[in-house]
Amino acid sequence: MKKEEKSDICIIGPGRLGLTLAYCFSSGIDRGINLVSVSGRREESVSNAERIIKKINRKTVFIVNNKEAARKADCILICVPDDSIKNVCKELFEKNGITGEGKTVIHFSGLKGLDVLDAAKSSGASVCCIHPMKSFADYLNSANSIKGTLFGITYDKKDKKACRTAERIVGFLNGKSIFIENSSKAIYHACACMASNYLIGLLNIVERMGKEIGVRPEIFMEGIISLSQGTIDNIRKLGTNNSLTGPIARGDVGTVRNHLENIKSRMGSNYADVYSLLGRFTADIARENKWIDMRTYNEFLDLFEIKKLL
C-alpha cells in the first residue's frame, strides 16, 4: 500500500464491534492501517481491550478520554450505540474540541445517516458510514469470520477522501461493499434486521410450535436449522424465486388450509397471523413464477383472509 494511503486509526467504543475492529487492525501497520488509540467511557471495557490488543500491538494507546484518543488519529471510528453517535461526535469537535481538518470520521450504524456527524463535517472532516451486514457475538469469532462480509457504505459522492477511506477499510477487512444513499438507510437497515433478528423471531415461533406437539426441542431444532440452511444454500445458488418449494409452490390449497386450522386451534390467532402474512408473500412468488394460476392464488388469499386481487 502506498505511503499516502496509510491511516492512523482511533476506535471510540470498544464494545463487540469496536473490539473486533481493533483486533483486526492491531496487526495491520504493514498494510497501511495503524491502530494508534482506543477509547471509551467505561474504564472496564477499555482495560479489557488493552489486555487483548497489547498482546499483538504494544504501541496502541488505551485511554478513557475520547478527545485525546482522537487527536492522535487521522481516521476516527465511532463504534458506539446509535443514539450516542451524535453526542460523541459533538464531544470531539465542539466546545474547544479537536479540528476536523485532515481527518475522516466514520460511524457504523445501519440506520443513522451522515447528519449525526455534522459536528465533524463542520469542523472540516470528511465523514462517512460503514455498516457491516453481520452480527457480532464475540470479537474472536467475529474477526475470524469477517472475510466476505457485505458492508453498506454511505458518503457524499463529492467527498472523494471519504470514499477512498471507506473502501480502504472494507478492503483491509476483505469485505465487499455496496453504496447506500443516505435517504435509503432505514430501508437498508430494515432488510438487515428482517434477515437476521426477525429470522430468530421466526425460528423461535417454530420452536414453540414444536414444543406444543411434544417433540424434544434440541433434536427438533437441529432438523429445522438443517432445513433452513439448505434453503439458504439454495437461495445462494438459485435466488429467492427459484428456491421456493412446498405446498404453496405446488398450489396445494388443502394442505395450507389444514395448517391454518391446526395453528389457530392449538397455538392461537397470533401464530396464525404470522403464517398467513408470510404465506401471502410466498403466494406472490408462486404467482410471479407462474407455478399457480390466478384462481389458486385467490384461494390462498381467501385462506389468509386477504382481499382478492381485482
Image (cartoon, rainbow, N blue to C red):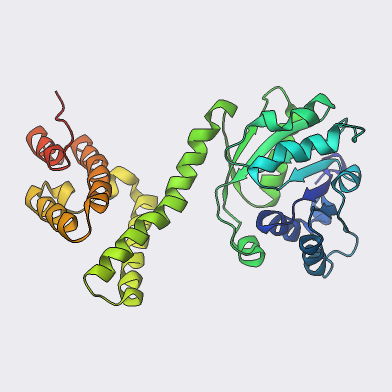
Instruction: In this rendered view, identify the residue nearer to me: 300 or 207.
Output: 207
The answer to whether any part of residue 52 appears in the image is yes
Q: Where is residue 220 in the image (x, y as percent from the top left)?
A: 30, 72
Q: Is residue 114 above or below residue 56?
A: above
Whether residue 307 sits left or right of residue 205 in the image: it is left
Residue occupying image coordinates x 82% and y 48%: 10
Q: Where is residue 236 in the image (x, y as percent from the top left)?
A: 39, 51
Circle count: 0
Q: Quadrant of the C terminus?
A: top left
Viewer-side residue, 265 vs 246: 265
Task: Please name the residue shown 61% across and 66% down the image.
Answer: 141
* Residue 289 position within the rendered picture, expressed as x and y whole percent measured from the top left: 21, 38
**In the drawing, does residue 22 fall left or right of residue 222?**
right
Dividing the picture into quarters, in which one does residue 206 lie?
A: bottom left
Q: Which residue is drawn at 10% across and 55% down?
A: 258
In the picture, measured across the screen, residue 271 lies left or right of residue 196, that is: left
User: Residue at (62%, 37%) from the top-left corner?
Assistant: 153
